[in-house]
Image (cartoon, rainbow, N blue to C red):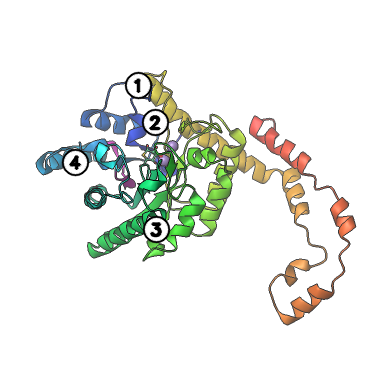
Amino acid sequence: MYTPRPEDRFTFGMWTYSNPGRDPFGDPVRPLPDVDFHIQAAHKLASLGAYGVNLHDNDLVPIDATPAQRDAIVQRYRAGLADAGMVVPMATTNLFSHPVFKDGAFTAADPRVRAFALQKAMLGIDLGVALGAETYVFWGGREGAEVDAGKDLVDSVKRYRDAFNFLIAYVKDLGYRVRFALEAKPNEPRGHIFLPTTGAMLGFIQTLDDPDMVGVNPEVAHETMAGLNFPHAVAQAIDAGKLFHIDLNDQESGRFDQDLRFGSVNLKMAFFLVKLLEDEGYSGPRHFDAHAYRTEDRNGVWDFCAGCMRSYLIFKDKVARFNADAEIQALIAALGADPEGLNALSAYSPANRNALRSRVFDIEAIGAEGRGLERLDQLTVEVILGVR
Ligand code: GLT
Ligand code: MN
Ligand code: MN
């Protein structure tokens, strides 16, 4: 019942399962990956029930590879992936690791860096499309500042927009069928990252040349770092028709970006997130952007991958129980009951205007009624804890 299948559309970033466990204070604890490992990993993930792998250009092709080396690596990997029965639904560009990006990529003050970032993104899109990706993610890890004197803040937003407009035109010009998904993060590696939340991204997208081509890729850890409620951010993205992709993981508040195994920290958040995705019929990949604890060897990494998928499916089962629980559903229905037919007045018309203006409300009585949310919340927790 909790065994993942390709239809569940679980995917892992190449950078997640191959994360060597390096941190600012410590060296890698697991071997650095090469293309052979990525092919083995595709088979391993397929055997665990995953659907696909997502990648940055340089997860697969070293930044200093010649075009001939790049083509050879891509050809090898494509064959290995097909052999494993896996797909690449999403790809992205690494615009953060190389020192050239230390003060930004699309928003760098230095025009040489901005131009190189565009070139790298175009080649990355070509690679993603060649591997079959339908979604292209942009996470602007270095787009930000510690020193606000170093770049004009309004110009930075304009530069960001110019870059996306350029790449939107590029994709159309070449006839690629790929959509962009922008991923927000408030800080780390920069002191302050531009467009720090999913809400900021949603506002920015509407200023682009073709907003329909661009959506968001919200990440649990990143909204949590900003102190925000992740399901609320995802709900807004769904309402706007902008949930093109999602980065599932977990995160403690007030910490560095932990990218923990899905469902390992905030069980209630994970429950309401899975409920939202399933109830709203989100059909994109369930992508885990997380990595195994630094304590683990490669076997621990596979435990981590299996755990992400299994926990998602357990939460999905809890959601089905919650939705089928008569007592819970009766409580929810009572919260929105409308015995006086007031919902019919919510759309503006002269008649509704007059009806609302003259209506007498007993606000003391309404304000004195208990909402029953303690009971509802306890029942929710009991569903999650497995006693209902
Ligand atoms: C990096 C980051 C992730 C992003 C990846 C895509 S790169 O690992 O921490 O949140 O989704 O660029
Ligand atoms: Mn992410
Ligand atoms: Mn993260």
Query: Which residue type does callout 1 highlight?
Result: Arg
- Which kind of residue does numbered mark 3 sit on? Val
User: Going from the N terminus, do you reach mark 2 or mark 3 first?
Assistant: 2
The residue sitting at 76% across, 47% down in the picture is 331
The mark lying in front, picked from 4 and 2, is 4
In the image, residue 27 lies at what x, y percent?
Answer: 33, 20
On residue 48, the disc is 2
Mark 2 near mark 3, Cβ–Cβ under 8 Å? Answer: no
Q: Is residue 183 visible?
A: yes
Residue designated by label 4: 74
Looking at the rendered structure, the secondary structure element under dot 3 is strand
Whether the residue carrying mark 3 lies under 8 Å from ligand 1 is answered with: no
Could you tell me how far apart the alpha carbons at marks 1 and 4 are, in whole angstroms?
24 Å
Q: CA distance from mark 3 to mark 4?
A: 27 Å
Classify 107 as above or below 213: above
- The amino acid type of the residue labelled 2 equals Leu
Query: Is 89 a magenta residue?
Result: yes
Circle on res. 298: 1
Q: Is residue 206 above or below residue 108?
A: below
Q: Are marks 3 and 4 in contact (CB under 8 Å)?
A: no
Residue 137 location, x and y as percent?
A: 36, 48
**Marks 4/2: CA distance?**
24 Å
- Up the image or down, 143 lies above or below 259; here it is below
Give the crowd class for mark 2: few <14, some 14-19, many >=20 residues within 10 Å.
some
Q: Residue at x 37, y 33 (%)?
A: 16
Span highlighted in magenta in the image: 84-93
Neighbor class of circle 1 (other Cα within 10 Å; few <14, some 14-19, many 20+) is some
The numbered mark, 3 or 4, whose residue comes first in the sequence reads 4
Quarter that holds the C terminus:
top right
Which residue carries the number 3 mark? 214
At x 84%, y 75%, the residue is 358
